[in-house]
Each structure stands twice: as C-alpha cells, then as structure tokens.
Amino acid sequence: PSYRSTFANLLGLRYIALPVPIEKVDKTLEPGSFPLIARTKDAYVYENPGALPRVMFVTGWRTVDFETVLDEGFPPAFDPTRTVLIENKIEEGEGPSTDAEANTSKVGMSSYTNTEISIEVNAERAGFVVLNDVWHPWWSVTVNGQEADILKANVVFRAVQVPAGKHVIRFSFKPLDGAFAELMAKIAPETE
C-alpha cells in the first residue's frame, strides 16, 4: 500500500530510485518521510531506514490465516523483528514461545548463492531463523546436517524452527527433486 509498510521492510527495500519526488508516487507519504540520499539528472534516490536484514532470529510466533493478511494487511501490533507469522500450528513444548521476547541471539549468512544458502545462528533460546527470501516448495533445509521443515513465514518468506544453541542452517534449491515429487504426487492417485 505504501513504501512505508511492513512488507517493504521485510523485502529489505533499502533504496528507492524514482524519476520524481517520492511523495508524487506514494501520496500517503509526507515530505521528508524517507531521507533523500542522492539526486541525479534522472532520479531521486531515497533510503528506507526501516528495511530489515535478509536473515533474522526471532523468538515469538503467531498462527494467522495468510489469506486474511493478504486481504487486510499485517496485524497492527506485528513486529517482524520479534515475531514470525505462520499458518500452521507448531508444537510448543521446548520450542519458541508465542510471546516475543527481546533477545541477543546472533544470526548471519555465511554464504549465499542462487541454489545454496548457509546461515549460522547462536540462539540464546529456542526460536526461528527467518529468511526474507521467497518461499518455494522446491527448497529443502537442514539444521546441523539433519533435515528440517521449512515453514512459510510472514505470508511469502521462509522460517526454520531451531532450539537454543549454535546451529548451521543450509537451504538447498532442488528443482529436479521438487518437480519429480510433484509429478509423482499427481501420478500416484491415478495408479491406485
């Protein structure tokens, strides 16, 4: 709905280059809403200080209906730096809390390519590694070499639940495996 939005921040939209002042494109913005950091003969370049990093660690989660979020927007009190929105209920047990807590856990990408992403986390408590990259069913993930589930997070992104401690998370894009699994799922009901 606006350059000043949760979704723009989740996308990591740090810089906005436009041929006209930003207020002429996004009428909801007041002049000065985004700092003008450069002006060329062809563009106005603004910085979004609210842009979020590609990978984050959060301790809180909420179950929501993503169709409702698409229709109505993110919940008003949603803070993506503390909470992840997921569609499916998770086991609470020793896992993350539904209450977001401030944390000093460290998370960072050690490598990033088109088909492989490696993330290291030192989590002071159980939580989620949230990767603000688009979710797709052909991605797989391991945590410390063990297969794990990728959760669809914040409507279109990815998250992995991890316990407290140090972990290496590896995402791998496997289009042939994914396409074959989808094909087999379509064929299997026909052969039964």
Image (cartoon, rainbow, N blue to C red):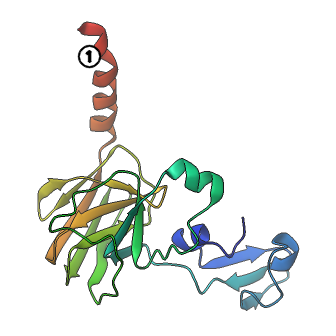
- Residue 85 at x, y percent in the picture: 43, 63
Residue drawn at x 38%, y 73% is: 55
Q: Quadrant of residue 74?
A: bottom right
Q: For this rendering, which residue is in front, 176 or 121? A: 121
Give neighbour class at mark 1: few <14, some 14-19, many 20+ (Cα, 10 Å): few
Check the image and report above or below for 5 versus 187.
below
Q: Which amino acid lies under the numbered mark 1 shown in the image of this protein? A: Ala
How many numbered marks are there? 1
Q: Quadrant of residue 82?
A: bottom left
Which quadrant, please, contains the N terminus? Answer: bottom right
- Residue 137 at x, y percent in the picture: 36, 43
- Residue 30 at x, y percent in the picture: 82, 85
- Residue 176 at x, y percent in the picture: 30, 36
Residue drawn at x 16%, y 77% is: 164
Instruction: Tell whether 146 sits left or right of 46.
Output: left
SS for dot 1: helix
Q: For this rendering, which residue is in front, 18 or 40? A: 18
Residue drawn at x 84%, y 78% is: 23
Check the image and report above or below for 113 versus 136.
below
Which quadrant, please, contains the C terminus? Answer: top left
Q: Quadrant of residue 101?
A: bottom left
Residue drawn at x 74%, y 89% is: 38
* Residue linked to disc 1: 188
Check the image and report above or below for 44 versus 112.
below
Q: For this rendering, which residue is in front, 79 or 178? A: 79
Q: Residue furthest top?
A: 191
